[in-house]
């Protein structure tokens, strides 16, 4: 098993080489191992996928539960893992930044901090506070004994505030504050991706599902470095479960079993991992 420092170096190198890479988002140890067996080079947690696995809404998971989840995913494979930390479980910059230290101790080599407050009356932190939070997180990240890759997220577009100019302004400020990767979830066109990637110099993470029909090559050409899928894989699994359940409950039939992955195929993918 690789050391945390070795994983961290591998993760940093992925952001430095040419082209773009896909970082899928498993929601438990099993999905992490299957994705590793398929050949992906790094993984990222998904706050929504993990919440669904616990039978909760996104945003309803505690810091303690998130740390333990990170620990399990990091132990499940030899791949670098980056953590979706939402707002880092605090409004105060110093307290939020301490979350970076805690998840690093659980084994992750990267993590995100976002400017979504969770407060319906004021969902996006004010500009100055948002920048202070990123700066505090960057200071903690840089104090660690390995190169922790800090991602700063500007959540305007994802939270219904369609202001690309303010999003870019925030990403530029987050870059200046010390973030290693910049991320504006819910870009919907390649032109928007180009607008973001041309405005900053650090690697940009792009959420793929909102960009309907795009390819990795197109996103790389638009300047994206890292491509994630958020909770989409977890939702895809849930979609299959719901369709199967509705068929059994409503029609009394089992047609959904005709195209499920054979157990033998799953066993082959998991065979490399032995606890």
Image (cartoon, rainbow, N blue to C red):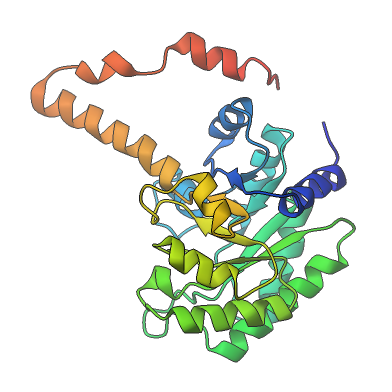
Residue at the location (63% across, 29% down)? 39
Image quadrant where one finds the N terminus: top right
Query: Residue 144's spot in the image, x, y percent?
Result: 86, 62
Specify whether residue 88 is in view: no
Residue at the location (45% across, 45% down)? 54
> Residue pushed farthest left?
251
Q: Which of the pair 232/63 is nearer the observer?
A: 232
Query: Residue 249's spot in the image, x, y percent?
Result: 14, 27
Q: Where on the picture, by quarter, is residue 42? A: top right
Q: Is residue 210 left or right of residue 146?
A: left
Q: Is residue 36 above or below residue 177?
A: above
Query: Residue 61's spot in the image, x, y percent?
Result: 50, 57
Residue at the location (37% across, 78% down)? 162
Query: Residue 199's spot in the image, x, y percent?
Result: 60, 76
Q: Is residue 178 above or below residue 214?
A: below
Q: Which of the pair 2/200 is nearer the observer?
A: 200
């Amino acid at each position: 098993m690789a050391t945390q420092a070795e994983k961290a170096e591998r993760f940093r190198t992925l952001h430095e080489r040419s082209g773009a890479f896909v970082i899928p988002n498993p929601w438990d140890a099993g999905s992490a191992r299957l994705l590793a067996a398929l050949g992906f080079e790094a993984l990222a947690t998904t706050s929504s996928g993990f919440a669904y696995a616990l039978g909760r809404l996104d945003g309803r998971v505690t810091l303690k539960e998130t740390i333990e989840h990170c620990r399990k995913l990091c132990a499940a494979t030899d791949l670098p893992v980056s953590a979706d930390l939402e707002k880092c479980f605090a409004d105060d910059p110093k307290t939020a930044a301490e979350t970076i230290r805690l998840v690093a101790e659980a084994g992750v080599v990267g993590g995100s901090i976002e400017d979504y407050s969770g407060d319906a009356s004021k969902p996006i932190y004010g500009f100055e506070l948002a920048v202070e939070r990123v700066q505090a997180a960057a200071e903690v990240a840089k104090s660690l004994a390995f190169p922790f890759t800090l991602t700063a997220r500007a959540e305007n577009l994802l939270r219904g505030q369609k202001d690309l100019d303010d999003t870019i302004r925030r990403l530029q400020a987050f870059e200046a504050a010390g973030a290693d990767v910049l991320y504006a979830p819910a870009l919907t066109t390649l032109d928007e991706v180009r607008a973001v990637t041309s405005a900053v110099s650090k690697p940009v993470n792009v959420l793929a599902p909102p960009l309907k029909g795009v390819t990795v090559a197109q996103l790389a050409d638009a300047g994206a470095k890292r491509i994630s899928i958020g909770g989409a894989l977890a939702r895809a699994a849930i979609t299959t479960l719901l369709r199967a359940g509705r068929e059994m409950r409503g029609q009394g039939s089992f047609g959904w079993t005709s195209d499920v992955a054979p157990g033998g195929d799953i066993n082959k993918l998991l065979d490399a991992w032995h606890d």
